[in-house]
Amino acid sequence: MTLNTRILGLFFFFFTTIYSQNKYPTNYFQNPLDIPMYLAGTFGELRPNHFHSGIDIKTQQKEGFNVFAVANGYVSRIKVSHWGYGKALYITHPNGFISVYAHLKKFSPRIEAYLKKHQYKKERFEIQLYPSSSELQLQKGEVVAYTGSTGGFVPPHLHFEIRDSNSKPINPMYFGITVKDDKKPTITTLMAYPLDDFSQINQSNIPLQITFKTLNNGNLLADKIYASGTIGLGVRAFDRLNGALNKNGLFSLEMKVNGQTVYNHSVEKFSFAESKYINLLIDYEQYAESNLRIQRCFVTPKNKLSIYKNIQNHGYLYIEDGLTYNVEIIAKDFKGNQKKLIVPIVGKEDIIKIHKEEKTTPYFIDSEKFNKFSKDGITVAFPKNTFYTNFYLDFNVENGETFIHKKTVPLHKKYTLTFDVSKYSSEEKKKLFIASFDSKNKPYYVKTHKKESTFYTTTKSLGKYALLTDNENPKLYTYNFKDEQWMSNYKQLVLKTSDDISGIKTYRGEIDNQWILLEYSPKKGTLTYNFSDKKLVGTKHHLKVIVIDNVGNTNTLEKTFYRKNK
């Protein structure tokens, strides 16, 4: 090797080392709010079917705090929706990162004017816009919006993200946006899992909860486990930060066996495409039955999460007769505070007294193949790789209600559920829809595709479904005014609306035959119009609002009001 080659090699070594240590600038972004930073949610927290992609900043249970651009940049996306992120703003910065602000009450006047111009042009409240880099340029520290609670049934807070140029969310803590935290994580539950038919834990071939106690040094010590074969461990754990009681997510979870790391995951960044594999990170059956998220310290087949590192043998523990194993499970937060759970395991071949029971049905799911089953006019069709494992499906129909297994099995794809509706008249079919039922047996409309003799829906949820009829019109009435009322001193016009069966699908409002921007709040059940949107001509005005539910039932409200222009 020549001297130049050695120098070049050293240069690249030091360059890559420095880059890896400084790939996230810590002094580039400011805080998005100027109030004390307390978090209701942390990055990578376990949520239904996804990881939390940002941090949730508390806003003192109030709306209307200034939201600041965290650095120079331009508005690259505006999204307004009744659900999800509600009113959200995306800012692209010169260094390639993107900051995201969600659940906003409204935007700054300049951005709000840009948005409403396009909403009125398209005559639509829900909208998605992609301004060019020259249209809405911003300076660091500029007010860009105000905190709110839009996006469904969410309390007031600011959801904040930082994404890379490929739209992968990154933990904002890496950028110097931080909070006080000197509290150790909490571990509440330890589960042990036999991973094949021949393994046992304390003479059981089914998962067992293992008790533990707290030692004087703060560590946790589990009861001794006697096991043999291939087993896995999992814990339920959370973290708390200073100034808040919220049970937040961990930053990392590590497992060591006799001092050697065999499992480790940490939430630095991820892609939205992989987020659904969260259902393989957790014990999904336990979550579905008890709402407790046990995080597995082993990696099951088909799990494609990128958060893992230093994994040995998938995190499986191979327990041999006569050997002892000292297992440590370490839960950490971003600040490095940690809680350690010590699990002593003794290898002991023993008789299995409690066996796993597998219920068989006529409906076997081969996860690698297309599966289709029909009964009493109802058909379920599962594409290849809808499920992660093979199993026997519970599929039954009683009095027109279909029961598609328990919600204890995670799905990777949507499947199709089809109802034969040939026995219904054309008029009856207009009011029919497919409904799913929650744990309290309350029905909810699911998107129903209608053909001449069949109705179908695509869904990722198992459980109970049925055809229901909705013959009732949506409710619609005035809230802050009456017919023939003077409203010169009013800033807003507010109506109330609801639909108890199939739910509201769409609405339209007009004043003097001109479309108006009505903002629907699912949480409050209100439709709100701001008089500042446009100047009305004259003093007498005719209001017309139409609300339509998901099967086409309609309610129309028409009122007269008076208003002097100021």
Image (cartoon, grey):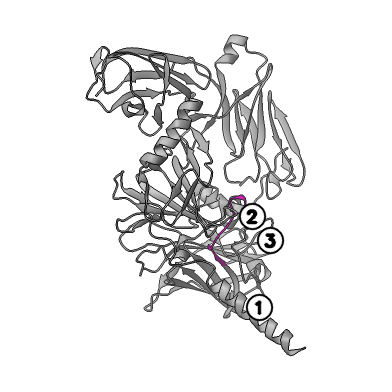
Q: Is residue 471 positioned above or below 195 on the image?
A: above
In percent of the image, x 54 and y 43: which residue is there? 132
Mark 2 and mark 1 residues within 8 Å of each other at the beta carbon: no
Sequence-first tag of 2 and 1: 1
Residues 383 and 329: in front is 383
Give the secondary structure at mark 2.
Answer: loop
Q: Is residue 112 positioned above or below 18 on the image?
A: above
The span from disc 2 to disc 1 (Cα, nearest Å) is 55 Å
Nearer to us of marks 3 and 2 is 3
Report crowding for label 3: few under 14, some 14 to 19, many 20 or more residues within 10 A (C-alpha): few
Report crowding for label 1: few under 14, some 14 to 19, many 20 or more residues within 10 A (C-alpha): few
Q: Name the image quarter holding the N terminus.
A: bottom right
Residue on which the image places disc 1:
12
Checking the image for residue 356, the label placed there is: 2
The span from disc 1 to disc 3 (Cα, nearest Å) is 47 Å
User: What's the amino acid at mark 2?
Assistant: Lys
Residues 275 and 467: in front is 275
Nearer to us of marks 2 and 1 is 1
Sequence-first tag of 1 and 3: 1
Nearer to us of marks 1 and 3 is 1
Which corner quadrant of the image does residue 418 belong to? top right
User: What's the amino acid at mark 3?
Assistant: Asp
Q: Which residues are magenta?
A: 265-273
Checking the image for residue 196, the label placed there is: 3
Left/right of residue 258 with respect to residue 25 in the rendered view? right
Left/right of residue 429 with respect to residue 156 in the rendered view? right
Q: Could you tell me residue 268's position as x and y percent?
A: 53, 63
The span from disc 3 to disc 2 (Cα, nearest Å) is 10 Å
Q: Could you tell me residue 35's position as x and y percent?
A: 30, 56
In percent of the image, x 70 and y 27: which residue is there? 375
